[in-house]
Image: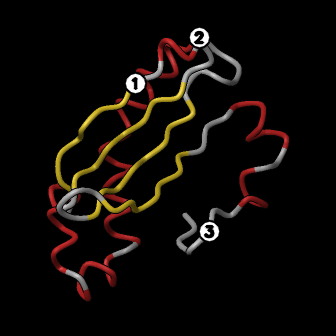
Amino acid sequence: MTIGPDYDWKQISGWYTRLMRDEVLAEWREGQETYELHVHCEVGRGIGWANMRESIFRREVDLVLEAFRYGDQGLYVKTPGLNDSRVIVHFHMKKEQNNRIEDWGRIGDYV
C-alpha cells in the first residue's frame, strides 16, 4: 500500500500489473456535505473472465477498505469527521456498459 498525494505510478506500471490489472486505487473527493473516498477497482481489463474477476474483487473489497482505514489511521485521528465519509466503489470493466458505481457505506464501518 502506498499513501500519498499522488498515485505510485512506478509501482502499478509494471508488465504484470498492466497485464492483470489487479490494482485498487483510491482518492478523497469533496462531496456535497463531506469528503468521499472513491475506490477504483480495475476488474475486466486483464486476463480472465470479467465476472470471475469481479466476484474476487467483491469478496475482497471489505479487506481492502479495512487496509485503507488502518493505513491512514493517523488521518482519522487528526480528522475524526472523515469516519462518516461515504465509500464509493467504482468497478471498471473492459466493456464500459458493465461498469458499476456503488455506495459501500462509511469508511468508519471498516475499523
Tell me where residue 82 appears, x and y as whole percent.
22, 70
Q: Is residue 56 above or below residue 66?
A: above
Left or right of 57 on screen, residue 79: left
Picture coordinates of residue 20, whole percent (x, y): 70, 31
Position of 49 relative to 35 (above/below) = above
Task: Report whether 97 appears left or right of 37.
Answer: right
Q: Which mark is residue 6?
A: 3
Question: Which one is closest to the eye, mark 2 or mark 3?
Answer: 3
Mark 3 lies on a secondary structure that is loop
| Colour scheme shown | secondary structure
**In the foreground, 56 or 94:** 94
Marks 2/1: CA distance? Answer: 16 Å
- What is the crowding at mark 2: few (fewer than 14 residues within 10 Å), some, or many (at least 20)? few
Q: Amino acid at mark 1?
A: Arg
- The kind of secondary structure element at disc 2 is loop
Q: Earlier in the sequence, mark 2 or mark 3?
A: 3
Residue 85, position as x, y percentages in the image:
21, 60
Label 3 to label 1: alpha-carbon separation: 24 Å
Q: Quadrant of the N terminus?
A: bottom right
User: Which residue, given by chain and number where applicable, does mark 2 sit on?
Assistant: 49
Q: Seen in the image, is 21 located left or right of residue 83?
A: right
Q: Residue at x 33, y 69 (%)?
A: 70
Between 36 and 19, the residue placed more toward the observer is 36
Q: CA distance from mark 2 to mark 3?
A: 30 Å
**Who comes first in sequence, dot 2 or dot 1?**
2
Marks 1 and 3: in contact by CB < 8 Å? no
Identify the residue position indicated by label 1 in the image.
Answer: 100
Query: Label 2 sits on what residue type?
Result: Trp
